[in-house]
Amino acid sequence: MAQSRGTIARWVRAGSLALAASLAPVQAREVLKPNIVYILCDDLGYGDVQCLNPQRGKIPTPHLDRLASQGMTFTAAHSGSAVCTPSRYGILTGRYCWRTRLQSGVLFGGDGPLIAEGRLTVPELLRRNGYATACIGKWHLGMEFPKGSAPDPARTDPLWQIDYGGRIRRGPVAVGFDEYFGISASLDMPPYVYIENDRFAAVPTVVKKWIREGPAAADFEAADVLPTFTRKAVEYIGRRAAEAQAGKPFFLYLSLNSPHTPIVPTKEWQGKSGIGDYGDFVMQTDACVGEIATALERAGIAEHTLLVFTSDNGCSPAAQTEDLEKKGHFASADRRGYKADIWDGGHRIPLICRWPARVKAGSRCDRLTCLTDLMATCAEMLGLTLPDDAGEDSVSFLPALLGTSDRPLRENVVHHSISGKFAIRQGKWKLELCSGSGGWARPKDAEATQQGLPDLQLYDMAADVGERRNLQAEHPETVQELVARLEKQIADGRSTPGVPQKNDVPIDLWKKDPAGLKKAGGRKGHEATE
């Protein structure tokens, strides 16, 4: 039976008539088809949103505060990873990224595709069920670039070997998006040139540098990127409005470059926050969200649009977090750590959902959720059952949105740090399989080991949200139980009910051997440069 269902799923992805059998409707369930606008910030901390951190936050975010008052705020939402690429993979596939070749770190601007050919994605699921789909912004999941030759033999950077006039394969338009406009990775990763659908919008002719140096289009400027993405998104909503009102819904995945480095607020926002460029850039990001919300209202489709706002991981130390804290702003609110870390500051993120027709204004959900849950939520909205080899780590949060159930959404969630260290959160307990931060914060793992700290960390998150009192020695039975659950989720190739699946590579749970990490497909060295 497992082989039969897997075969059907492959036919689905090839566009065969088996789609109806594989994505079978669930009987006696209402089918909901709201427009979906998914806004993903880059490195925005939970505590950067004023209404989520009123005591320790100093950055005004009036548009996000308004959005929260109009919809549901999830206070226990997490990204699947403490860094960019893995979280984005999870959002679009409903699968933990550590099941792929990317066992640590992130991809870079010229890297190949991470999403395997034939894997069902959120945009493909929606497109096959009547949605128009678009992606605007940072991709950061790899593409297959056409090969050319460097215009100047002295330019040895492999990015100059790309044929910028050729066709890009296995990018956004190959995994379910009807259209795409954006950049290949983070704004501090070359090439610095826009991509439209499966073509570069220009040919790089100069070298520019925003942290990293590389090929750039002559007119490409980092400060223009956020306004450009915002304008493109507003234009897309305007173009889709009439068809949306006529019953043809759309899915817009708006992946912002902010407030990730380079931190480049435009002139009109400089000095607005009073605490530096990062605060100004967050305020500009907040205004961007306001423009999107206004565009939906102006188009007359806000009532029947699920507007999701979130971030891919916690705030980056590159925001000068120590300086921000001296000024009274704590981007991780009351949590320990920042981006890259296994502690909650690395992966606890804001998640706000507005859907006026169905979601109660000013509501709140304190149940555990993960960014991988978009896939299952969309499937449930459409009354569909996912194939066994899709959305293996996705749990629907639709019951919370609609207020139809107050039961826990997911039993547990697995966390992953930039160096590939694992943690699992279940109930009040959080177990971390490392001695330090697993990331950039001190003590890093090697430093923690030198200090004689235990190899494991166990925290009671109900009593110790700051993760300061390690209880691993006092609760060995809890440690054993949580390790066994992690091992089972790895062995099963999934964390949800269903036929067991295969991970793409062998998974090294303990990450004790750097050579083993490399053998499993890890990308050594990325942790210092993401």
Image (cartoon, rainbow, N blue to C red):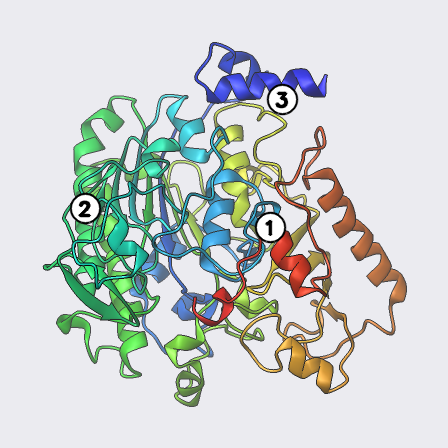
Residue 502 vs residue 314: left or right? right
Whole-angstrom CA distance, mark 2 to mark 3, is: 38 Å
Q: Secondary structure at mark 3?
A: helix
Whole-angstrom CA distance, mark 3 to mark 1, is: 21 Å
Indicate the amino acid at tag 3: Gly
Q: Position of residue 96 (x, y in %)?
A: 58, 47
Q: 212 or 372: nearer the eye?
A: 212
**Closer to the camera: disc 2 or disc 1?**
1
Q: Crowding near pointer 3: few (<14 within 10 Å), some, many (20+)?
A: some
Q: 290 or 257: nearer the eye?
A: 257
In this view, the residue farthest toward the left is 219
Q: Secondary structure at mark 2?
A: helix
Q: Position of residue 446 (x, y in %)?
A: 66, 79
Q: Is residue 213 above or below residue 275?
A: above
Instruction: Point out the tag, 2 or 3, that comes first from the N-terminus.
Output: 3
Which residue is under mark 2?
232
In this view, the residue farthest toward the front is 153
Residue name at image x 72 percent, y 65 percent? 512
Instruction: Point out the tag, 3 or 1, that comes first from the N-terminus.
Output: 3
Residue name at image x 13 percent, y 57 percent? 205
Whole-angstrom CA distance, mark 2 to mark 1, is: 32 Å
Q: Position of residue 359 (x, y in %)?
A: 45, 42
Which residue is under mark 3?
6
Residue 218 vs residue 193: left or right? left
Which residue is under mark 1?
98
Residue name at image x 67 percent, y 74 percent? 467
